[in-house]
Image (spheres, rainbow, N blue to C red):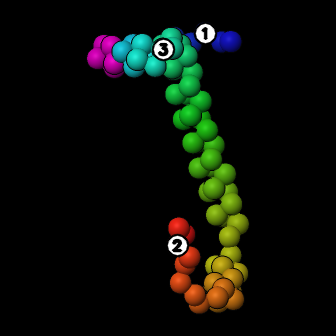
Amino acid sequence: MTPLTIHLPDGIARELEQCAAGEGVTVDQLMSSAASEKVSALLTMELLRRRAAQANREDFLRFLDASPGEAPMDGD
């Protein structure tokens, strides 16, 4: 593990400590989990942007035209 020093406003630090205690984890564990979630979200957005850049509108419209014109099933 790599140690990392961060500076947080006092209020955020207090809230962080309270949240960690409420979850039954250490502040380090909570911060690691939060950072992992954020990195995952950023990487997912980057992947979606790269895939969207390869999209072809004509192919998409052709796909929609070939789809049945029925109402969605319950739950869709």
Q: Are marks 2 and 1 in contact (CB under 8 Å)?
A: no
Disc nearest the viewer among 2 and 1: 2
Which element carries disc 1, helix, strand or loop? Answer: loop
Q: Nearer the viewer, residue 13 or 7?
A: 13
- The circle drawn on residue 74 is 2
Disc nearest the viewer among 3 and 2: 2
**Residue beneath the point at 59% across and 90% down:** 69
- Quarter the C terminus occupies: bottom right
Which residue type carries mark 2? Answer: Asp
Q: Is residue 63 magenta?
A: no
Which residue type carries mark 3? Answer: Gly
Lower position in the chain sequence, tag 3 or tag 1: 1
- The circle drawn on residue 3 is 1
Give the number of marks: 3
Residue 20 quadrant: top left
Which residue type carries mark 1? Answer: Pro
Q: Are marks 3 and 2 in contact (CB under 8 Å)?
A: no
Kindly give the residue lying farthest to the left in the view shown: 11
Answer yes or no: is residue 8 visible. Answer: no
User: Would you say 72 lies left or right of 60 here?
Assistant: left
Q: Is residue 13 magenta?
A: yes
Which element carries disc 2, helix, strand or loop? Answer: loop
Residue bounds of the magenta highlight: 9-15
The picture places residue 54, in percent across and down from the top left corner, at 70, 66
Q: CA distance from mark 3 to mark 2?
A: 40 Å
Predominant secondary structure in magenta?
helix
Q: CA distance from mark 3 to mark 1?
A: 21 Å
Residue 12 quadrant: top left
Q: Which residue is mark 3?
A: 24
Q: Nearer the viewer, residue 8 or 33?
A: 33
Q: Nearer the viewer, residue 12 or 52?
A: 12
